[in-house]
Image: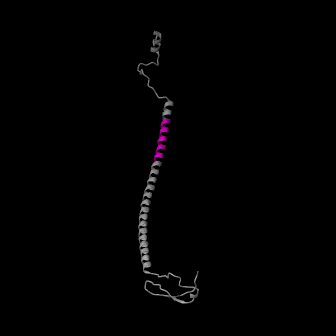
Amino acid sequence: MSFSHEQLMKILNNESFQLSEPTTPQVQPKEDETQLLQKQLLELIQQNSQFNNQLTQIKDQIMKQDMIYQNLEKTKQRLENQLKEQIQKNQKLQEECDQKDQEEKELKQQVLITRPKKRLFTQQSVGKVVNYNMTYKNNQKKNSVIVSIKK
């Protein structure tokens, strides 16, 4: 950039020109840039608030799930203990049943019933007292009266 002599003289004579002014002007941010930065800052603050709210909700959900898990673990333990107790009771009952069955077999072996091989009774035997061998555990014999005979 070149100035003519006359132009330089005019500049020097200009009252507004002062040598004490800085040669590089200070850059002031424009109003639009400031507003834009403030707007962005507000958006970031809102996003941060939303994020914090979501984080709090997630923490609450995790705590609830943890409590549910703990309750489920306690319930599982309780049910396992009940199952063990029930299995033990069932085993005891099975042993008792086996023992009763064995006793019943022994009692059946002790009670001997001798039945006649032939048909001893006919229609004419109705109403008669018959003495047939029936042996019980205490070795008693019974007399019976024939009521009817089915063919």
| Vertical side of 116 occupied by 8: above or below | above
Residue pushed farthest top? 5
* Residue at (47% x, 10% y) in the render: 6
Tally of marks: 0
| Vertical side of 44 occupied by 129: above or below | below
Q: Quadrant of residue 70?
A: bottom left
* Residue 25 position in % (x across, y down): 44, 23
Magenta-colored span: 39-56
Rendered image coloring scheme: one colour
| Vertical side of 50 occupied by 19: above or below | above
Main secondary-structure element of the magenta-colored stretch: helix
- Front residue of 125 and 107: 125
Residue 53, magenta (yes or no): yes
* Residue 28 position in % (x across, y down): 46, 27
* Residue 14 position in % (x across, y down): 47, 16
Residue 55, magenta (yes or no): yes
* Residue 147 position in % (x across, y down): 57, 86
* Residue at (44% x, 62% y) in the render: 79
Q: Quadrant of the C terminus?
A: bottom right
Q: Quadrant of residue 92?
A: bottom left
Q: Quadrant of the N terminus?
A: top left
- Front residue of 129 and 32: 129
| Vertical side of 82 occupied by 125: above or below | below
